[in-house]
Image (tube, grey):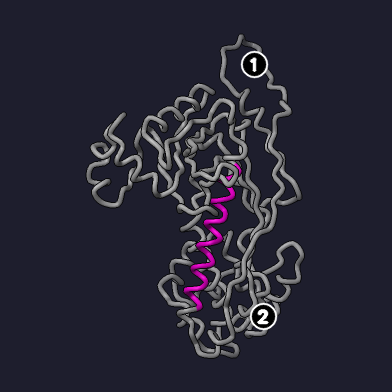
Amino acid sequence: MKLQEIVELPEIKAIKDQYGPDKDGMEDFMKDMNKNPKVGGFVDPFVYSVHQGEVYDTLRKIPLREILGGGTGSDFMSYLIPTKIYQVLLDAARDADISDDIVGLNIRDFEGGTIQVVWGLVDKMRPDWYQEPGGPAIVTEEVNRLSLTPKPFGMDLCITESMLEDSQFDLMEYHLKAAGAEMGAFVTRHVVQRMFAGYDSSNNAVAGSQDAITVAQVMSAINKVENQGGAADRFVGISEHKYDLATDTTTLNLALQWKEAVAGKFQVDNFLGLGWLWTRKETTGACYSSAETDYFAAVFEKAKGAALAWKRPITIKNYTAPREGLVGAAVTARIHAGALHDGDFISIILET
């Protein structure tokens, strides 16, 4: 797809038709988005579009500096700059955010103040024999539910006047990628922390080792989820846990299981029936308990572990002009996550 073709797609054409074809039209559109109390900033018109994949694939091949350094005036580049900036930001956020691999229910573009996830009904959905001409037993609603009220979070983009004046567009892209990665990591941290806060600590807690975890502890966590009627299929831990498990030879020689993977990048797709996911080791990270001042790992069933609701996607606040508007801009979103099923299907291994 050519850049000129992107501007002629319905998503951009609708903006041009309403606000005018020149660069002022795009600027007016961006100002209106910032004034809109529901949006509160710039959200790329392609973010939920069927054309997003093709548009972003095209823009990924072109550095930001080339688009920012393009023509001015009524040139079509003015319509591409915000989308390119958003693509850089969103790609970095998605790379750092593993919540899609963690939550069983990811509610995007949620409308309203609070959403009620009635998980009690799911617990009662079981096939059984019945006598015709009757039908299956009617399921009565349980009061068991999770309330999610998305809250805003965000950060300054740290784009300065000098970056524009001195055409430091590579540095600008570097800042955008860093900001996107931090936003993605924040979402992951929120989800994992909410799972930790909501898991069944009475029945599903596993005592870890001194600053480490073992294969036996992972197997114990799997067993605890199964004892609750679940089927654990995910593991989330800090990067250091890779080395803990790789050097553990007491229960299963994990190094022999991983073989080439361990000798290389310590990647494992499916060991002990789990999908393995890793987060950064930091005291402000996903797998750290400030109350216990220790790191933890989570073993859980994805489908029944947690839910995440987005009331507002990643948004660039105070971004009101395609070329100059990033100075003083911030990136924000609005989310809320929580554990489902009283945390029955989440087990936590807490280091000592």
Q: Residue at x 59, y 50 (%)?
A: 190
- In-front residue for pair 3/216: 216
* Tag of residue 135: 1
- From this viewpoint, which residue is outermost toward the top? 131
Quadrant in the rendering for residue 24: bottom right
Q: Residue visible at 53% across and 58% down?
A: 184
> Is residue 93 something that shows in the picture?
yes
Q: Is residue 150 above or below residue 220?
A: below
Residue that mark 2 sits on:
27
Is 162 left, or right, of 310 in this rendering?
left
Three-letter amino acid code at disc 2? Glu
- Residue 25 % position (x, y): 67, 81
Say what amino acid the circle numbered 1 marks: Gly
Residue 86 lies in magenta, yes or no?
no
Residue 1 image-quadrant placement:
bottom left
**Residue 4 shows in the view:** no
Q: Position of residue 49 (x, y in %)?
A: 57, 61
Magenta range: 172-194
